[in-house]
């Protein structure tokens, strides 16, 4: 629709933007060749009303010719006969100077810009005697939805064939040469003027009313005093009196007489300095709009929205700035089409991407929640934040705690599968709660036991001290839980082994199936310490290496019941071990 100049909703956006750009560009000096002779309030008062008598208009025409006007354009409809004397007098006066008088067309519907010349349904023609004395031009104006004149049609299809517009005929009379119409231009006295579709002249007003030199018709009708000089100029005679004649709203003035609109068109045709809005400009508009739309959609689709949206907004600001600058230079590019073409698809794509990203975020959250069920929470967060976590093994000092329920095999045989599962779930829940409270990581559940490490997934201080405190908390809490379960002397108890040293933290397994693992001599020794506790009849076996690594005082938990040097199966060096046979005076350990 834009390419063929058919009116659309985009024009409703374009209209205020055009007005704004026109105001930014500001008023311009009109060419000196055009002057308006106005039948103004003073003239109407002196002539005791309007319309003026036809013979008085004849006097006015003769006076304009006597003032040296090169041509005359009369923007007044003479469709009703007056007296024969007055009509003949006006015809004689018009014949004495190159002149054009107004006709008007009627249209079946509101007529917008079209690819061909506008076609009238019928016309209002001047009286026959006058058409023999002067040329005739149609004064119809093409306005936008708000009534602001935007174009002057230069050619009309009428019942009498193709007729030129009033402004074009007047400019030709002033130039003294017939205009030459091309497909997209009109040439007047060697001045080539670009046209919009359907031979429409884009209007660029010079300023508010009376910016084009305007003189009162009263000065020509008065018998005394000097008359304004019109030498070599074209006089455009029209009505500007209040509440008389047609008026239009323009960006510079809400009440602009119709004669000033016609005079603006005549001046632009003579000076060749109006607005350029032709097929080439419209094609550039469409190409730019398409580029912005496609580019904006690709940007918001492919790069983060925090970058894409500012880039799109900046591009639109640059385009709007460029159209404003070019408008000041006389090139009328559409400011609305790029907005209308790019904003909706970019907004829809942004909305679709946000919905997609929210869905992806939910899926990631669900995957992370699932990962947390199979990996310790601290490790799951590290893996979610950094998928390459531990792609290379890491060695560091850590505390390792092994826990086991002694006598569980016989207990599970008595309970059966269902009750055994419920029993273990309660045990594991209690274990995880205590370990989390001391910032440890449960690496593995091994049936009735577990391996726990401190200091591998965070930088919390004193991993040895936290492991020591967690071991005693587990002994006490599990002992209390077993007592609530009604445990007897034959029921399971808890046994713990703790050691501190260097461990290797790495990923084990196939590329498509991996798990985080802690390994090394420290892990093996902590596991063997449970056997030491069993053979010594103790609940907790702690290496003196761990006690030495603690930042706090282990005596807060009570002195060990025994400290001994023991040989560890499969290990050459013996180990100094502290043994506790209880974890508190009131809580049985089984």
Image (tube, rainbow, N blue to C red):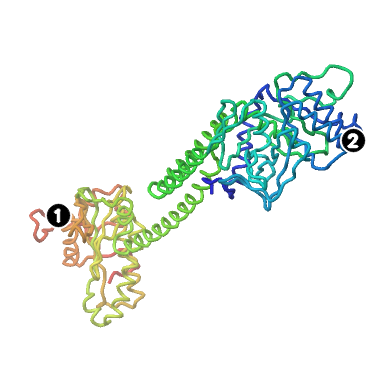
Any part of residue 464 in sight: no
| Up/down of 254 relative to 543, above or below | above
Q: Identify residue for label 1.
A: 575
Q: Earlier in the sequence, mark 2 or mark 1?
A: 2
Left or right? Give the position of 21 relative to 370: right
Please name which of the two marks, 2 or 1, marks the residue nearer to the observer. 2
Please report contact status of discs 2 and 1: CB closer than 8 Å, yes or no.
no
Of residues 377 and 196, the one nearer the viewer is 196
| Up/down of 119 relative to 76, above or below | below
Left or right? Give the position of 533 relative to 429: left
Q: Name the residue furthest top.
A: 226
| Up/down of 40 relative to 467, above or below | above
Percent from the top left, x then y, of residue 158? 66, 46
Q: Identify residue for label 2.
A: 49
Percent from the top left, x then y, of residue 258? 74, 36
Label at residue 402: none
Label 1 crowd bin: few (<14), some (14–19), many (20+), radius 10 Å: some
Q: Secondary structure at mark 1?
A: strand
Of residues 278 and 492, the one nearer the viewer is 278
Percent from the top left, x then y, of residue 238? 77, 33
Please give the name of the residue rendered at 66% of the width and 38% of the height, measured from the top-left corner. Answer: 165
Percent from the top left, x then y, of residue 541? 21, 60
Label 2 crowd bin: few (<14), some (14–19), many (20+), radius 10 Å: few
Q: Quadrant of the C terminus?
A: bottom left
The image quarter in which residue 36 lies: top right
The image quarter in which residue 244 lies: top right
Of residues 571 and 253, the one nearer the viewer is 253
Could you tell me how far apart the alpha carbons at marks 2 and 1 are, in whole angstroms? 126 Å
Any part of residue 307 in sight: yes
Q: Name the residue furthest right.
A: 48
Q: Secondary structure at mark 2?
A: loop
């Amino acid at each position: 629709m834009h390419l063929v100049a058919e009116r659309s909703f985009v024009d409703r956006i374009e209209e205020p933007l055009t007005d704004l750009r026109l105001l930014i560009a500001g008023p311009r000096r009109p060419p000196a060749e055009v002057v308006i002779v106005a039948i103004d309030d003073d003239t109407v008062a002196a002539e005791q009303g309007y319309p003026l008598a036809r013979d008085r208009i004849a006097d006015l025409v003769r006076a304009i010719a006597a003032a040296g006007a090169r041509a005359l354009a009369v923007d007044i409809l003479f469709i009703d006969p007056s007296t024969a004397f007055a009509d003949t007098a006006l015809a004689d006066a018009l014949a004495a100077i190159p002149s054009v008088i107004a006709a008007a067309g009627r249209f079946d519907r509101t007529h917008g810009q079209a690819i061909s010349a506008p076609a009238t349904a019928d016309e209002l023609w001047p009286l026959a005697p006058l058409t023999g004395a002067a040329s005739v031009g149609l004064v119809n104006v093409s306005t936008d939805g708000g009534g602001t004149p935007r174009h002057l049609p230069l050619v009309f299809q009428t019942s009498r064939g193709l007729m030129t517009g009033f402004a074009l005929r007047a400019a030709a009379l002033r130039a003294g040469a017939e205009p030459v119409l091309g497909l997209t231009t009109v040439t007047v006295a060697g001045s080539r003027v670009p046209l919009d579709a359907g031979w429409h002249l884009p209007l660029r007003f010079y300023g508010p009313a009376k910016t084009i030199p305007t003189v009162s018709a009263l000065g020509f009708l008065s018998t005394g005093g000097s008359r304004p000089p019109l030498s070599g100029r074209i006089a455009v005679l029209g009505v500007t009196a209040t509440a008389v004649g047609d008026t239009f709203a323009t960006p510079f003035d809400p009440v602009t007489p119709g004669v000033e609109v016609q005079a603006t068109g005549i001046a632009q045709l003579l000076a060749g300095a109006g607005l350029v809005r032709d097929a080439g400009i419209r094609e550039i508009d469409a190409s730019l709009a398409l580029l912005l739309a496609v580019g904006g959609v690709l940007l918001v689709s492919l790069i983060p929205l925090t970058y894409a949206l500012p880039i799109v907004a900046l591009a639109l600001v640059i385009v709007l700035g460029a159209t404003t600058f070019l408008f000041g230079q006389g090139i009328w590019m559409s400011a609305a089409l790029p907005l209308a073409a790019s904003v909706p698809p970019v907004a829809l794509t942004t909305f679709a991407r946000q919905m997609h990203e929210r869905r992806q975020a939910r899926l990631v959250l669900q995957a992370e929640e699932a990962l947390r069920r199979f990996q310790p929470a601290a490790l799951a967060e590290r893996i979610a934040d950094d998928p390459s976590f531990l792609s290379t093994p890491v060695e560091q000092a850590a505390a390792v705690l092994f826990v086991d329920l002694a006598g569980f095999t016989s207990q599970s045989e008595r309970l059966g599968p269902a009750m055994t599962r419920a029993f273990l779930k309660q045990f594991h829940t209690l274990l995880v709660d205590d370990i989390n409270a001391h910032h440890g990581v449960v690496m593995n559940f091994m049936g009735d036991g577990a391996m726990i490490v401190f200091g591998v997934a965070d930088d919390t201080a004193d991993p040895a001290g936290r492991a020591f405190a967690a071991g005693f908390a587990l002994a006490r809490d599990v002992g209390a839980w077993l007592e609530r379960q009604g445990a007897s002397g034959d029921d399971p108890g808890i046994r713990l082994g703790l050691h501190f040293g260097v461990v290797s933290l790495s990923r084990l397994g196939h590329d498509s199936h991996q798990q985080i693992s802690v390994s090394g001599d420290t892990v093996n020794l902590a596991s063997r310490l449970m056997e030491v506790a069993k053979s010594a009849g103790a609940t907790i076996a702690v290496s003196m290496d761990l006690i030495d690594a603690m930042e706090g005082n282990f005596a807060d938990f009570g002195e060990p019941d025994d400290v001994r040097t023991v040989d560890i199966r499969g290990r050459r060096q013996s180990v100094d071990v502290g043994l506790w046979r209880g974890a508190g005076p009131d809580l049985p350990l089984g």
